[in-house]
Image: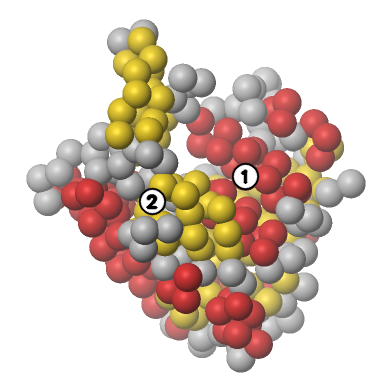
Amino acid sequence: MRIVVKIGGEIIKSGLENIAADTARIAAENEVIYVHGGAKIVNEISEKLGKKPEFIVSPTGSRSRYTDKETMEIFEMVMAGKANKKLVEALIAKGLNPVGLTGIDGKLITAERKKVLKIKKENKIIKIDGGYTGKVDNVDPTLIELLLKNGYIPVIAPIALSHENEPLNIDADRAAANIAGAVKADILLFLTDVEGVLDKNGKIIGEISARNVDNLREQVGFGMEKKILATSEALQMGVKKIIIASGKIEAPITNALTGEKRTVIVNE
């Protein structure tokens, strides 16, 4: 079975021991690909370097990082360096063979640079320069397939290559969805700081019909909204199953695959 696992920066900071130990068990019988975030780690380093993170709000209310040239340099340094290598080191400590990558390596991920962004500011919709943010338009799985064939675990940071050969900040959840689609993954697993998608009463929604996924986007918070969008994209690209579960428990991958506290979306 081929599994794409996406983890966030909060898990990289405090949950890698459980992740790595469980990966050693899962990778014995399955092919595992990691995609990671690390926004909070980027914020911390950026603050230390005297560059205050800047966030913008889209007309629909989604909040995201504004990535100017200096911010992109910090983002690339932290994501490809500190965040990526912490996960790589944790996996090596468990006897695994991870290889840290970005989407730039081997032209793994190319993206269209957003020339203009529409944002909401003081109840007005204005246009600003797009900076160094991109939307994925292609994933070339050649390098991933080569690594998997030879027993390695790809660990991929969410940095893409623009058509102008520049680095771009891309959303990690949507990067994971595109990678899962490109490698024909059996499962896309989002490990988060919650146990799944919650209903209005705060209870976990155990199963979601693929045809109802898009209806959830307006009902969930910002962080989960991005995962629901990524889930929808992964389903369209043919991924068979998407699971959203907690990464902050013992044996998080095993529990996500077989436990009760999780949200499962199966492609119909």
Decide: is 16 above or below 231.
Answer: below
Residue appearing at x 33%, y 47% in the figure: 132
> How far separated are the C-alphas under marks 2 and 1?
16 Å
Residue 145 coordinates in the image, percent (x, y): 63, 80
In the displayed structure, 118 sits above or below 14; it is: above
Q: Is residue 73 left or right of residue 85?
A: left
- Could you say which disc has been placed on residue 230 in the image? 1
What is the crowding at mark 2: few (fewer than 14 residues within 10 Å), some, or many (at least 20)? Answer: many
Q: Which mark is residue 255?
A: none
Residue 169: image tag: 2
Q: Quadrant of the N terminus?
A: bottom right
Q: Which residue is at the front of the view, 173 or 67?
A: 67
Whether residue 176 is visible: no
Instruction: Give the residue type that dot 2 points to.
Output: Asn
Image position of 185 (left or right of 71): right
Between 106 and 223, which is closer to the camera in this rendering?
106
Up the image or down, 205 lies above or below 81; here it is above
Q: Position of residue 243 (x, y in %)?
A: 71, 51
- Residue at image coords 78%, 55%: 238
Q: Is residue 35 visible in this depiction of the protein?
A: yes
